[in-house]
Amino acid sequence: MYQKLKELLINPDAFFEEKTKEKNDLIVPAIIVLIGSMVGLIASFVVSDFLNIVESRHIVVVLTLTNFLVILLRPVVAWLLLTGIFFCFCRLWSGTGTFIATLQNTGYGALPLTLLTILPILNAIFINAKVNIPQWIGFGIVFVFDLLTVVFILWSGYLWTYAMEWTHKIEHDKAIASAAIVVLLFLAYHVITVLGIVNL
């Protein structure tokens, strides 16, 4: 399994070509998405704990049942929505893949986003009032984490390009266009959340 996931991350062309020869199986993609849900949930507890310690910031984070469910289900809902977006765009490009195959390979392509869920935990450590670091280092750390977020989103877009190309038998440039639209949506969401316009 490790070798397969390694191939997915560094050689998605070969990985998804092989997937077209196999029977659709949603177990591993579902595990990838659910791990993202669980790590995101753990990260929320860690972040809320650290933020509630920082009294000088006057921030109180309360993890309600509603927030719990939103955090837990958000990656699953995103998986379904992204699959729908990919499926519709690939159909516009005269793609031939099924919705289930699209769901499977969209889930595989989300692996970098699942890895990304660990970053809020690391970020929370550095905003903890008990960690004394110079302000310029703190800004640098935040910048690096934001940069990594962008990199991991682009990485998923790279995987999704090959996923859609092989799933729907469409031209590479059309697969790039489909993945680029989704990546732009992710990047826009990231910018909006960073600016504090929404908090979802």
Image (cartoon, helix red, strand yellow):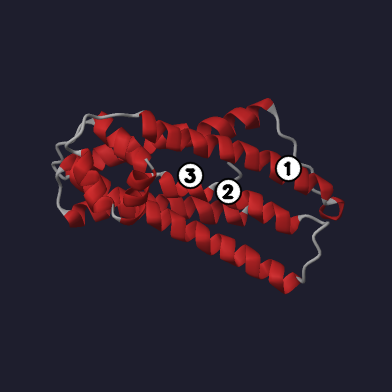
Could you tell me if residue 187 is visible in this image?
A: yes
Judged left or right of residue 50, residue 29 is left
- Residue at 52 percent across and 53 percent down: it is 190
Q: Amino acid at mark 3?
A: Thr
Q: Secondary structure at mark 1?
A: helix
Q: Is any part of residue 80 visible from this angle?
A: no
User: As shown in the figure, which amino acid type bears the numbered disc 1?
Assistant: Ser
**In the structure shown, which secondary structural element does the residue marked by tag 3 occupy?**
helix
Circle nearer the N terminus (1, 2): 1
Q: Is residue 173 above or below residue 22?
A: below
Q: Quadrant of residue 129?
A: bottom right
For the residues labelled 1 and 2, say whether their Cβ atoms are less than 8 Å apart. no
**28 or 103, which lies in front?**
28
Q: Secondary structure at mark 2?
A: loop
Q: Separation of disc 1 and disc 2 at Cα?
A: 15 Å
Would residue 198 be found to the left or right of residue 19 on screen? right
Q: Which label was assigned to residue 126?
A: none
Residue found at the far top of this picture: 65
Q: Which mark is residue 48?
A: 1
Q: Which residue is mark 3?
A: 114
Residue 44, percent from left and from top = 66, 40
Crowd class of label 3 (few under 14; some 14 to 19; many from 20; radius 10 Å): many
Residue hosting label 2:
118
Where, by quadrant of the figure, is residue 138 drawn?
Answer: bottom right
